[in-house]
Image (cartoon, rainbow, N blue to C red):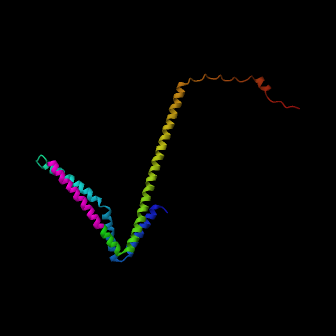
Amino acid sequence: MELKDQILQTKERKKGFLKAMPEDTRKQINIYTKLDKIAKNFWIIIVAALIISGVVYLVACFGATESNKFVLHGILAGLWVIAGVALAFWIRSLALKGKKAVGLGAPDYVEELNAINARLSGLERAEKQRLAAEKEEAKAKARAEAAQRKADEAAQRQAAAVEATNPQPAPQPVPQPAPANLAADTEPHELP
């Protein structure tokens, strides 16, 4: 079975698993999934804090008229970054605590969901690796064909150069046909 079929079957299994559970458990699992995404993607808050602090720094520096504005606004921008990092880790810890609490409410469902998600991510990773290997194989094949064409062209150029540097051999004299009476003597005779 191909990886694509396995991925589709696993997704269908996940959908069926989610539809088969009771409504209140499904809500808990949805909250668990969202908290898991938040906990995994907390670094986005850090990047946003860096971008915001850079913008605030530039706007404040160009808008201020004091001579030490760069240092003062640099300190403020640094505080923005520190606050953003602290906020990101605080949100991450809240998400992990919430995820753990929801997981304790429906442990069997959470374990099954984690198993399905792990299988799905493993299959998707394998599919990506297979596609990357196919691309590399195609590139290697194209490079080999290009190298073969270059080698053929080089061989042709070398053959042309050898022909140009070697003098043409003198034409061989064309043998003359033998006289007719000699041709008769060369026929085999039968012995009695």
- Residue at screen point 42% across, 68% down: 115
In the image, residue 37 lies at what x, y percent?
32, 64
In the image, residue 75 lies at what x, y percent?
18, 52
In the image, residue 30 lies at what x, y percent?
33, 70
* Quarter the C terminus occupies: top right
Check the image and report above or below for 114 versus 84: below
Check the image and report above or below for 176 versus 9: above
Check the image and report above or below for 66 versus 128: above
Residue 27 or residue 179, whichever sits in front: 27
Name the residue furthest right.
192
Name the residue furthest left.
65
Give the quadrant of residue 7: bottom left
**Is 86 covered by the magenta stretch?**
yes
- Residue at screen point 17% across, 54% down: 76
Q: Is residue 18 left or right of residue 185?
A: left
**Is 72 covered by the magenta stretch?**
yes
Main SS type for the magenta part?
A: helix
In the image, residue 20 lies at what x, y percent?
39, 75
Q: Is residue 44 left or right of residue 65?
A: right
Check the image and report above or below for 78 versus 93: above
- Residue at screen point 64% across, 23% down: 172
Count of residue discs: 0
Q: Which segment did they paint magenta?
A: 69-95
